Amino acid sequence: MVTAGQMRAARALIGISQAELARRAGVSVPTIKRCESEGENIPVVSSETQRKICSALEAEGIEFIPENGGGPGVRLAKKTAR
């Protein structure tokens, strides 16, 4: 599960607004705000909604790093030459 902090950090890394993330994910701005305002875990949203948001971020190169003893995180993957 992606945390609210990971979601905020991911959006900051790619420099987009909540409104832009909502547009790219096909969800409402209030949904993004709720997801980013929770403590550790994203509030109860459908798995489909969470998938849409994460997919929109991952399409921009975001990688979600799971909890591994050092805490969950995010990083911006290097773009590969095509």
Image: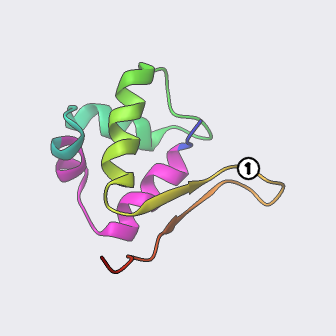
Q: Characterize the magenta stretch by its predominant secondary structure.
A: helix
In this view, the residue farthest toward the front is 82
Left or right, 12 with reference to 21: right
Residues rendered magenta in the picture: 4-22
In the rendered structure, does residue 45 fall within the stretch colored magenta? no
Q: Which residue is at a point 35% across and 27% down the rendered structure image?
A: 49
Left or right, 62 with reference to 67: left
Looking at the picture, how far across and down is residue 79, in whole percent? 38, 76
Q: Nearer the viewer, residue 72 or 55?
A: 55
User: What residue does disc 1 label?
Assistant: 67
Left or right, 41 with reference to 33: right
Secondary structure beneath label 1: loop
Q: Which residue is at a point 30% across and 31% down the rendered structure image?
A: 31
Left or right, 63 with reference to 40: left
Q: Residues within 10 Å of mark 1 (few under 14, many from 20)?
A: few
Q: Nearer the viewer, residue 1 or 38?
A: 1
Looking at the picture, how far across and down is residue 77, in whole percent? 47, 70
**Height in image: 8 above or below 76?**
above
Looking at the picture, how far across and down is residue 52, in whole percent? 33, 35
**Height in image: 18 above or below 15?**
above
In the rendered structure, does residue 10 fall within the stretch colored magenta? yes
Residue 8 in which image quadrant? bottom left
Q: Which residue is at a point 39% across and 53% down the rendered structure image?
A: 58
